[in-house]
Image (cartoon, rainbow, N blue to C red):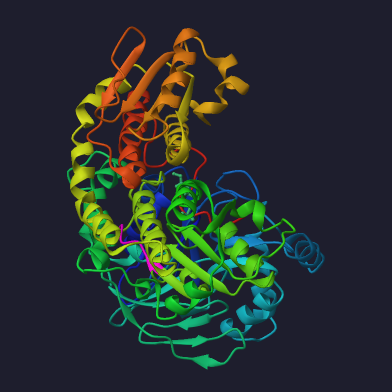
Amino acid sequence: MCGIVGAVSERNVVPILLEGLQRLEYRGYDSAGLVVGHGGQLERVRSIGRVADLASKCANTSGLIGIAHTRWATHGVPSERNAHPHISKNHVAVVHNGIIENYEILRSRLDAEGYEFTSDTDTEVIAHLINSHYARGNSLLSATQAALAELVGAYAIGVIASDNPDHMICARRGSPLLLGIGIEEHFIASDVSALLPVTRRFVHLEEGDVVEIGRSGYQIYDAESSRVEREIQISELSNESVQLGAYRHYMQKEIHEQPQALADTLESVCNSQSLVPGIFGAEAAQTFAETGSILILACGTSYHAGLVARYWLEEIAGIRCTVEVASEYRYRVSVAEPKTLVVVVSQSGETADTQAALNHAKKNGHDHTLAICNVAESALVRLCKLRMLTRAGPEIGVASTKAFTTQLAALFMLTLVMSKQRGRLSAEQEQKHLHELRHLPAAVQKVLDLEPQIAKLAEQFAGKHHALFLGRGLHYPIALEGALKLKEISYIHAEAYPAGELKHGPLALVDKDMPVISVAPNDALLEKLKSNLQEVRARGGELYVFADAHTHISEADGIHIMQMPEHAGYLSPILHTIPLQLLAYYVALQKGTDVDKPRNLAKSVTVE
Ligand code: F6R
């Protein structure tokens, strides 16, 4: 989704803005732009397409203050006129991430006041609104505060004015924005990665904060316009961690980072002799003791992680668990079960639907909340009482990979802790699970070694238009995840079914042109799955089976086997995810799609 960068400095800020935008490209965008202030004027450059196209137009642009933006279209098609920044009467410039819900009413009013609209965006309303307050003699800060009070919706904004070369204003509510602290220079950005070349000192702004930023200082005002201090945090992210290195794509890099990401996420339990609730927060023991059921809310890949966890939580911990797509739950009238622990799962921690679902759950009376999230300072983490941070590191590729497997690891730890607390885990079982968790990174590395074979297999998919994924039990959500990965980066239509559902409809689709990919772990459902595979083969379907050792499914005409290592018990879904990620990656390579930035998609979905 949209990315914001801003800077006020004693040096030319254009290279800082362009580098920042490049680093935010992963969020997904269709156009980009920047505006700088100098000599009492605003100079704007905008471009449809890549940040590189914008950079090529900026050769003669410079200024000591500026704001920049990558746009992911919501109101109005992707075009140069709709690209940000938007400028009101050559006077006030604004970049915005979020959605203004009451923009139509405001637009009619501002139209009547003589403000001319040159785009179809909701953002242009903000520029004119601030300008209308500014023109009445307010400071840029007060004008912005007054305008924000009239907005309904979500925003992170950066504002500059032609006659104020020394100050930039920024504000956030519902969309991410942080402040970067330099020496005699300050910055704003949607996330830390954008500013790593210029600073590692950051202030994470709270909901409703408005900031006046100069070269040598800044003042933060909270939602009630009171001056507040916010803690400066030093980012642990290194510049290298967001660089591509030797890999061809971020997705490939992130797939290969999974052993380390899992080891980091599991560090707290792997280095200890026993499982303790404290890894989820100081109040976890008390909360878990009171928990009677679990409700998991998430979107996309994170939702699939929740679906796997449901099998674990019910079977191992004996606790009732429901999993809901956040965008549905937020609008559904539901019956709140007392003693339910609400678990939100998210890579970014900024997903608008998941945030809204969490707020909806709280309004419904749920006050036990846990975030499983990859970004420590994100909104979801701050909104929940308990937390477990996955330590996947920055995920740049739009298609989620290492975030998913680390979410699974975190959810498995939740299962074990819950199970122990409920007296369902013997000391012996606990040690066995801990041993398996310690071994997990090495087991994942072994599966990654299948990469060359999977790259070869992918050649057979490049000409296909559809694919069917099958799984059963714990691995049905893995089939869903495999289908999602394939469709989002290769644009091949892919669907996933629990294998037992085949004969209730999807079998009608099976013919020689429909590849059927099956996850075949050596578990209790193996024999059932084998019968389902026979059903496919009998209809001439081409089978691609990811089979554990000793499953006794043999290569034959129309049956291609990818041999997985030993069965990993409850952790098997994590291992079976890896080849499906690699398959999607190599099929996308075959098809020549933009692997890290698939069309129409954004990394951080901060609007509804
Ligand atoms: C798919 C993918 C998305 C995200 C979804 C939720 O590869 O990445 O489906 O999983 O948009 O995002 P988070 O986890 O940031 O809440």
561 vs 310, left or right, is left
Tell me what residue is drawn at x 65 percent, y 55 percent.
329
515 vs 249, left or right, is right
The residue segment tinted magenta is 388-392
In x, y percent, where is residue 514?
Answer: 48, 15
Tell me what residue is drawn at x 48 percent, y 46 percent.
304
Q: Is residue 462 visible?
A: no
Tell me what residue is drawn at x 55 percent, y 52 percent.
83
In x, y percent, where is residue 354?
Answer: 56, 59
Q: Quadrant of the C terminus?
A: bottom right
In x, y percent, where is residue 107?
Answer: 75, 62
Which one is nearer the viewer's eye here, 312 or 297? Answer: 312
Please determine whether, in this image, residue 28 is positioned above or below residue 518: below
Identify the image quadrant of residue 478: top left
112 vs 211, left or right, is right
Tell me what residue is drawn at x 35 percent, y 49 percent.
405
Please determine whether, in this image, residue 460 is positioned above or below residue 125: above
Please determine whether, in this image, residue 535 is positioned above or below residue 199: above
In x, y percent, where is residue 360?
Answer: 66, 66
